[in-house]
Amino acid sequence: MKITLLPSALAEPGAALHQYATSFLVNDRVAFDAGSLGFHGAPRDQAAVQHLFLSHSHIDHLASLPLFLENIIGLTESPVTVYASEAVQECLRFDVFNGRLWPNFLDLTSAGVPFLKLETLRNGQVVVAGGMRVTPIAVDHVVPTLGFLIEDATSGIVISSDTAPTEAIWAAANRMANLQAVFLEATFPDELADLARLTKHLTPAQFVAEARKLQRPTRFFAVHLRARLRDQVARELLAHGLPNLEIAQFGTTYEF
Ligand SMILES: [Zn+2]
Ligand SMILES: [Zn+2]
């Protein structure tokens, strides 16, 4: 399985690359979140995405969705399937594709072909997509949010962003036969633990406590570091000395 955290900032010479929005691309065909998906590569690269899973309704995970759908019109053999919980679907309908922010792509068609196919995600209910088994697990964030267990024939990964400390996703991850890597959020530095609690995110100390809930050693990749606090969060994460921990690099493809 290969996974890329899609960049969301221009790589200016001499400047650090920052992540402002979240999208993961798995095996080039299945995307998780649409924060930066619609800004990625050429329209043809985006049209290779046949399945898109949405974790929650926050704008850093949704921002480029209207543009992504616009970019791929006429380039795909069949409409992209977008998987979202009922809560996220309600937000798409009333807050995004409402005819003001963007046309109602949920109901419009192009030459009789819908722009997308909407499927409902339910906690714990497996979806088979793009040759993978995807299990959404409810996590704990300020809006309804799902983490994902993703498995193909040879390997498994977990993506959990955004969330506060939880239990269910770790219990499910401990049952995965071939878990290779976990992509977990670490948003705020330890000194902002109050803000993390209020906004239901993790600090580096909480990240490490979450990682220890796994019963087998697994590679951990930290994602969703708040851009303006990135260096501090990264420093604190690495200082905790968790083995197999890396700060995920944008634009890098990891293979498991
Ligand atoms: Zn969020
Ligand atoms: Zn977020």
Image (cartoon, grey):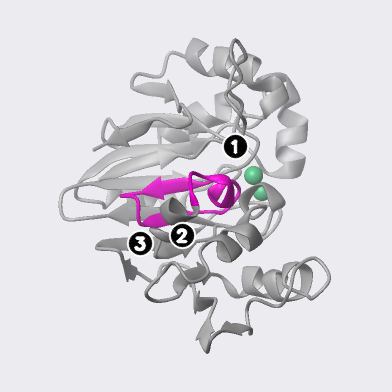
* Residue 5 image point, x, y percent: 46, 38
| 29 over 103 or under it: above or below | above
* Residue 134 image point, x, y percent: 35, 61
Q: Residue at x 58, y 35 (%)?
A: 224
Q: Which portion, as a residue range, is magenta?
A: 23-42
Image quadrant containing the N terminus: top left
The foreground one among 2 and 171 is 2
Q: Secondary structure at mark 2?
A: strand
Disc with the residue nearer the chain's start (1 vs 2): 1
Q: Which residue is mark 3?
A: 134
Q: Secondary structure at mark 1?
A: loop
| 255 over 236 or under it: above or below | below
* Residue 24 falls inside the magenta stretch: yes
- Quarter holding residue 255: top left
> For the residues carrying marks 1 and 2, which lies nearer the camera in this image?
1
* Residue 108 image point, x, y percent: 63, 83
Residue lying at the far left of the rendered structure: 154
Q: Secondary structure at mark 3?
A: strand
- Amino acid tagged 3: Val
Q: Residue 170: tell me if it is visible.
A: no
* Residue 171 falls inside the magenta stretch: no
Q: Which residue is mark 1?
A: 8
Image quadrant containing the C terminus: top left
The label shown at residue 137 is: 2
| 146 over 37 or under it: above or below | below
> For the residues carrying marks 1 and 3, which lies nearer the camera in this image?
1
Left or right: 43, with 255 as reference point = right
Marks counted in the figure total: 3
